[in-house]
Image (cartoon, helix red, strand yellow):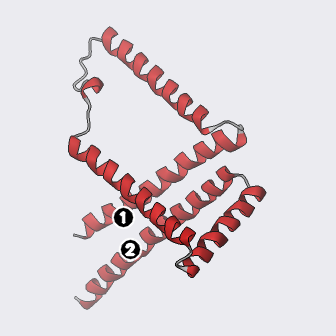
Amino acid sequence: MSETKGSKTMGELGKAIGLLISGTLVYHHCANRNATLLSLFSDVLIVLLSSLAILGLLFRQLNVSVPVDPLEWQISQDTASKIVARLANTVGAAESVLRVAATGHDKRLFLKVVISLYFLAALGRIISGMTIAYAGLCLFCLYMARLNSQSTGNSVLRRTNRETSE
């Protein structure tokens, strides 16, 4: 059981590192190169399309059959429905909070929304949005790594306690 838990925590650490690397590349592309997110998206598509074309030509030359045709990849209707439902729930919840805040029925919520929006507007004037998003991503990755190290430390402590009691 400890092996499964250890591999799970290492998987979480891998996700955090992968997310940090991806975020760093996006930040470099958008902030340092002064390019837009649309430019990044089109660059990624061009690289993927070129790579797939080159691999396709190489596989044809070497007479290698591809086991799965990418044109046949599809997501199920259930998965698509879940994605749309989650998006609709998120947008609906945000709309509900803003509607209640705008009507003024909940004064505390109204003040929280106004203060948050004012703070974000002031922060946006000082620092670019891409820098704020990257800082948030770095903090999130550090949080994931900390959770991973705590759970790994707890499993090591349990293991050493078990060995000393035996």
Relative height, residue 62 to residue 13 (above, below)? above
Q: Identify which residue is drawn at 67% across, 63% down.
A: 120
Q: Residue 151 or 115: which is nearer the viewer?
A: 115
Q: Relative to residue 53, is residue 110 depicted above or below?
A: below
Tag 1 residue: 9
- Which residue is nearer to you in this view: 161 or 33? 33
Residue type at mark 1: give it. Answer: Thr
The answer to which image quadrant residue 149 occupies is bottom left
Which quadrant of the rendered structure holds the C terminus? bottom left
Q: Which amino acid does the dot numbered 2 rest on?
A: Ser
Alpha carbons under labels 2 and 1: distance apart: 7 Å
Direction from residue 35 to residue 61 in the image, left or right: left
User: Residue shown at 43%/17% (left/top)?
Assistant: 54
2 or 1: tag closer to the N-terminus: 1
Q: Are the two marked residues, 2 and 1, in contact with CB atoms closer than 8 angstroms?
A: yes
Q: Residues within 10 Å of mark 1 (few under 14, many from 20)?
A: many
Residue at the image position 50 percent from the left and 66 percent from the top: 99
Relative vertical location of residue 121 with respect to residue 30 in this rendering, above or below: below
- Image position of 10 (left or right of 69): right
Residue that badge 2 annotates: 151
